[in-house]
Amino acid sequence: MTVREWAERMTELLDFCSLYYTIQLVRCALVSFAVFAAIFLLRKTMFKNRVFLKGALWSLFFPVLFAGKMKFFYENVAGGFVFSSWTGLLNHHRWLNWLYFGVMFLYAVRLLGKRRKLKQLAAGMERRQVDGASVFVTELPVTPYTIGVLCPKIILPQAILEQYSEKELRAILLHEKEHIRSGHLLFYFLWDILRVLLWLNPLFAIGTKQFREDMEEICDWMTIRKNGAGAYEYGRLLLKTMRLLQAESKDFNLYATFAGDKEYRRIRQRVARIAGYKPYKRSAAVGVFAAALLLAIVSAAGIRAGSYGRYNENDSMLVYGFDGNGVTFSDTGNSDALHQMISYDDSYVYVDREAFEVYLREHGAGAAYIVFGGFYKLPGMGGYSYSCYYEADAGEQTAKIPYDNHDSDWWVSLMKLL
């Protein structure tokens, strides 16, 4: 293969990949609208005061990522009606696929840039030991927070370290440690990946805020339970932190209550949720998340079971007839009848000569291309088939025709892997 041929095949492969994956991601994004509707509704109704159940709702997004290849989109009237137009649009306007990936790339760069900036800020901070924990101290008037996924770093402002008692610092550190122990930092990272992949859904802007609120509420409840000081003391500590940071920075205005300041409303809502704290059993909370995880895995497995595979064996058979001057007919919808006359193995095609030549004469042809087997990625999209040429003659009853089997070709192997 020449360099030019290799480049052409790689260009063709990239173009196919852009279409193949964009179609799936767009379908997942559209399905995510229904998931958002269910979560938003349940958060405001049945699960409004059920902190752990409300947080567990977000696990419903895990199966969404497996929804792109569901047979529902092809073998169901409703699925075909709703989603076929998108598939046709992306197939006929290939630049839309590259646009989708371009926006996805820029969005990912933006989010990674924010994470990198926080990491760089932490790298320049002083490291201290506080209550047995390693923390990074900043002069900025910010609320305590934790960054990182594999190597979490707790960030505390200098003002809090100077003015808080050991008991208060222990409660603040406990809150940040609960975020780490509960896997919230990993959840935030996975959520960022999800909203990058499915950026087409604008509801992720609202969902991100609510998702973080629910994780924060869970962490508040776990901290109150472990700290043992009660919801009132914990809420008072939060308000004290806000007052302290407001004093350190004019931009952090706790007392803009009557002006409708967003930061104040956020704090007020959080304090109100803390006030609703009720004692709970740890086993019950663990059970909720175990059940949510199990449900997500079972749902994903069910979706995959009802979806097309990474590649799918193609058992269809097509015939294109010739009369010496050109194509006389193409038979693309009579696969069962063709299988009665034609069979094949890894090296040869076997044709019942008598039956097949009667078939060709009925269609005014003396020869034919037989297309058979192979695989496809999705119905009508991507894949590979085999072919051979049949010419009528007076040979044996069963014609034995060799054909090229390209299963070991790198191109075919790569297509199957995608």
Image: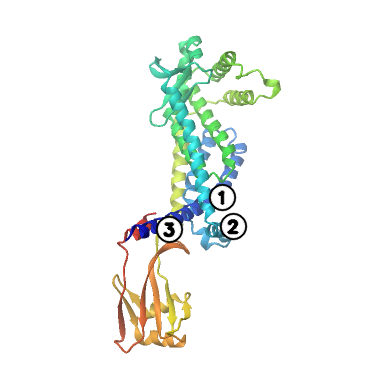
Q: Residue at x 48, y 33 (%)?
A: 113
Q: Which residue is at the front of the view, 87 or 6?
A: 6
Against 65, is 163 above or below?
Answer: above
Q: Which residue type carries mark 2?
A: Val
> Residue 199 appears in which quarter of the rendering?
top right
* Residue at the spot of label 2: 82
**Which amino acid lies under the numbered mark 3 shown in the image of this protein?**
Glu
Q: Which mark is residue 12?
A: 3
> Residue 347: x and y, percent?
28, 72
> How many residues crowd around disc 3 within 10 Å: few (fewer than 14), some, or many (20 or more)?
few
Does dot 1 land on a helix, a strand or a loop? helix
Residue 30 disc label = 1
Where residue 32 sits: x, y (%)? 55, 47
**From this viewpoint, is residue 284 visible?**
no
Q: Position of residue 285 (x, y in %)?
A: 47, 33
The foreground one among 167 and 3 is: 3
